[in-house]
Image: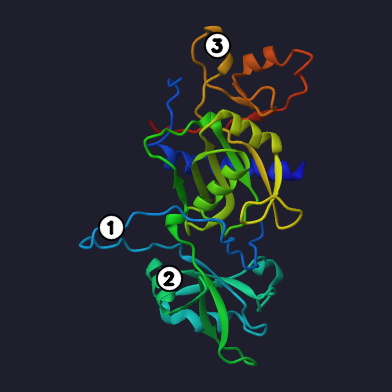
Amino acid sequence: MEGDGEGVNKQESNVEELEEKLCQLIVSDEAPVEDEPQDAAPDAAVQEPEASSPPAHQELPTQRYSRKVFVGGLPPDIDEEGIISSFQRFGSLVADWPYKAQCRSYFPPKGYAFLLFENEKSVEELVKACVKDDERLQFWVSSPSISHKSVQIRPWKLSDNDYVLDRTVPVDPRKTVFVGGLPRTLSASEVAQIMSRLYGTVCYAGIDTDPELRYPKGTASVAFSDRNSYIEAIKTRFVTLRQDGRKCTSDKRVEIKPYIWDDQNCDNCLTSGYGTKPAHFFCSNISCLRYYCLDCWLVMHARPDIKFHSPDYIRRMSTRWS
């Protein structure tokens, strides 16, 4: 299906990024969507983990942001030049919105745009200039027909990229799922709590971001503490979520599938005493969930009961972290 293919392509593009983020947590081989314009603030039921207060003499670390910032509620007649002039006092920037080049539109068609700043410091200054109203950041812009209109500023905090329940507990790649179609406003902590309520304890969640601007792509990786939770999650395959984690008939439909790693060895070779051979295929059928080399795939999937399984090809990376 077209949706499945898109999900797999997104998953493969994120493998190298996720491996780098998990390199200090991972269990070794030897161990037993168009950007959404709506206000996507999560429900109050989704609570951030409480952080302990630092000593009085300790200075709080500076909050870091993506250089890409969402701005919503723009006047309908504000053009690209007007957007840039409204924010250029914070630093050099480019105004962008979905399908801007293809549509050749001078006005954001849905009332929102993205500010792509040249420097991260510009985002910090913009945030300082905003007024906080009920957890939202407000700024004011003008257009030919509207003066001093309030708009929403939504920066992405880099601290929201990752959530780790316990850094002493390693992450198992065989209990990790890929989640596609997520609202881009959800932090890793919120994703972890949503998935925990649905399937069981999550030990790690990571938001996939683009390497240049470090802005969410709408996908994530989630590792469970228990294999049964992992199985239940991938059996679901698709689930419709509110941003507070409750199932519903509207809002955002997300896809859940096994996360395919590129550095795994053939499971059949290991269990059959043939030594270690790099795996080239993964079977995501719920009755398999195993990695195979070419020879073992052909042998094992010649059986009538599983020969209909479709392999997921593993793109072997040229370099591997240790």
Locate residue 36, reporting x and y percent: 65, 63
Amino acid type for the residue under numbered disc 1 = Pro
Amino acid type for the residue under numbered disc 3 = Thr
Disc 1 packing (10 Å; few <14; some 14–19; many ≥20): few
Residue that badge 2 annotates? 123
Is 181 situated left or right of 14 in this image? right
Q: Is residue 36 visible?
A: yes
Is 297 situated left or right of 51 in this image? right
Locate residue 300, reporting x and y percent: 68, 13
Q: Are marks 3 and 1 in contact (CB under 8 Å)?
A: no
Q: Are marks 2 and 1 in contact (CB under 8 Å)?
A: no
Mark 2–mark 1 Cα distance, whole angstroms, equals: 25 Å
Using the image, determine if residue 17 lies above or below residue 306: below
Secondary structure at numbered mark 3: helix
Secondary structure at numbered mark 2: helix
Q: Residue at x 45, y 23 (%)?
A: 29
Q: Nearer the viewer, mark 3 or mark 1?
A: 1
Which quarter of the rendered picture does the C terminus lie within?
top left
Which quarter of the rendered picture does the N terminus lie within?
top right
Residue that badge 1 annotates? 54
Badge 3 or badge 2: first in the primary sequence: 2
Q: Nearer the viewer, residue 44 or 236?
A: 44
Q: Is residue 209 visible?
A: no
Badge 3 or badge 1: first in the primary sequence: 1
Q: Nearer the viewer, residue 308 or 153?
A: 153
